[in-house]
Image: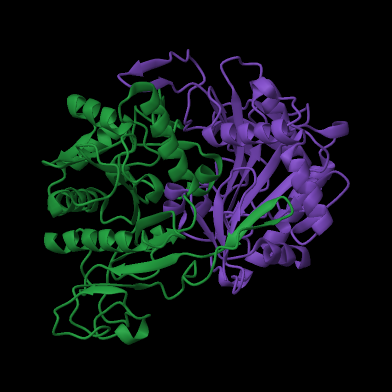
Chain colours: A purple, B green
Amino acid sequence: MPELRKDPISGGWVIIAVERGKRPTDFASPPVQRRKGGFCPFCPGNEYTTPSEIMAFRPSSTQMNTAGWTLRVMPNKFPALQIYGGLNRSGEGMFDKMNGIGAHEVIIETPDHLLSLATMPPKAVEDVLWAYYQRLSDLKKDSRFKYVLIFKNEGDAAGASLEHSHSQLIALPIVPKLVREEVDSCRHYFEFKERCIFCDVINQEMEDGKRVIYENSGYIAIAPYAPRSPFETWILPKKHESVFYPPNKSFSSLADVLQRALKQMDRILDTPPYNFIIHTSPFTEEINEYYHWHIELMPKLTNIAGFEWGSGFYINPTPPEEAARFMREAKI
Amino acid sequence: MPELRKDPISGGWVIIAVERGKRPTDFASPPVQRRKGGFCPFCPGNEYTTPSEIMAFRPSSTQMNTAGWTLRVMPNKFPALQIYGGLNRSGEGMFDKMNGIGAHEVIIETPDHLLSLATMPPKAVEDVLWAYYQRLSDLKKDSRFKYVLIFKNEGDAAGASLEHSHSQLIALPIVPKLVREEVDSCRHYFEFKERCIFCDVINQEMEDGKRVIYENSGYIAIAPYAPRSPFETWILPKKHESVFYPPNKSFSSLADVLQRALKQMDRILDTPPYNFIIHTSPFTEEINEYYHWHIELMPKLTNIAGFEWGSGFYINPTPPEEAARFMREAKI
């Protein structure tokens, strides 16, 4: 008998095929590959083909927009939003619109075209997290922006148009609907229970253990109880933190959990395309007791997202208990 | 300058690239094709390979589960939910679950392996709508069910596992989250305005005209003001109707608009994969003044759904005004 399970945060129900769940090898997607040889605008030496850099990690002996960097951030060459201008909120009859003001930036995670976030040195993963944090801190100062969405598309099938490993961020003058709903849902739970719902989830998962993938001193990776897609993985700070932040000025513990999850996924799912999104509190309520920042990581294994995002109804052929076990047992 | 637009029903904002919007030919997806020759369980003569039929349109001289039908409905061979059993709602610590009780059915729309909903005779499209309606009416009698989700996945990339033209339905013991939110949002608007929000949208669109794709006496096809994906199309009854229903006992007017939209899409987007979903009122509030049933049709043109459904934030490279114009001007 399949199970209907409710996600306690979103309130959405999903169907979980608990009996003959699909195993990792049942998902046949072509592995994400990186090839040397072609021209890549993200490779060192080609800085002149991209917009001018916003920040970079590079020795002080090197020049801006030249090779020598280990990480580089610049505006997206084809931005979804524009950085200059006023919001100009207005109506169009019963409809509402505003200017598409915002920032759309690209974080080139490594100069090495062949490395991925799973295969680069751990220190480089830490640097990627530092870059996220620094850009977030900088964009927060612009009073037009209410939220920064930090995400990564890995592989063509997950929306990456270039194979050189990179993340993106979009600074927005609005809080996206799903973020608003998630934060509001957590606040309602807090009003009722006087506890953070994610803290409650973490406590129950740590006691139970069967959906825990990995944990270290600071962070935990779990397969959520009602995952929308097979092998969906959440990475959360074990102690309550409402906003993406380096505790004790270090991202090493988070980088460890994130990279391990990516290595495990690569191992059991043959280097799948994936998306991850950083879920953090909106700027106007960054420090709070009710929302718990986290990363949601989803390998892109199936093609049915069209129907699913149109209906809000998900069918997941792999129980999270099995997904977590496969992830835990992956030899990395 | 791109535009941020708010969907008045969902409240979600999307980014619309209003300046250099992508034209239909900018979306290069392989056309959906149907090939003769291979074994197809949905073709006449192979009825023995599928579960026994629930209903069929067939001459009374023919036997159940044999050839001769023009439309056939049967349980999905690999159902996401099971039809027999009790719901058995229960908790698992802080989590909620119930048995995966429901119906999962397949509507084979035509005996001809090579036809699509766009190319079959108009009368056959009407029959498909009648089949939806009859199954909906039948499943409503089962008190365990609260909603029936009727949808079509066309083409492998949109989630169709078999190429023979078919639709599906899933009867659910819960109302899906997005349906609940949409209905609630319409009810709130009604409480405020004492008008149906979709009726207001239709009135404004008919006056304005630039997002109207086609209309006949009963129905209208529009490109919504804040579409989540390029060439998203909504088909709505022009007069307020809260539930999917054949007015004057006829689906001919609806079949006309639906098939025309599919033909237009096939023409300008080269037979793209697509999904459509019937949005109708939940069983417990079928007749109401606030919700307006409709069809949401989305060609599957891009690969970025993973990030988008994870964030609830959509970037649409084609303004709906241009999409509607291309659709209107398609030579079909």
Q: Is residue A318 placed above or below A89 in the rendered structure?
A: below
Location of residue B91 (image quadrant): bottom right
* A74 horizontally vs B332: left or right: right
Q: For the image shown, how many numbered marks are present on the structure? A: 0
Residue in the picture at 47% in, 64% down: B102
Who is closer to the viewer here, B216 or A71? B216
* B322 horizontally vs A269: left or right: left
Who is closer to the viewer here, B268 or A242? A242
Q: Position of residue B291 (x, y in %)?
A: 34, 38
Q: Position of residue A85 (x, y in %)?
A: 47, 14
Residue in the picture at 40% in, 37% down: B316
Q: Is residue A162 placed above or below A223 in the rendered structure?
A: above
- Residue A110 visible within the image: no
Q: Where is residue A313 in the image (x, y as percent from the top left)?
A: 48, 52
* B85 horizontally vs B153: left or right: right
Residue in the picture at 42% in, 60% down: B171
Q: If the image is split into quadrants, where does the N terminus of chain B sit?
A: top left
Location of residue A232 (image quadrant): bottom right
Q: Position of residue B191 (x, y in %)?
A: 39, 26
Who is closer to the viewer here, B49 or A194? A194
Q: Is residue B139 placed above or below A222 in the rendered structure?
A: below
- Residue B176 visible within the image: yes
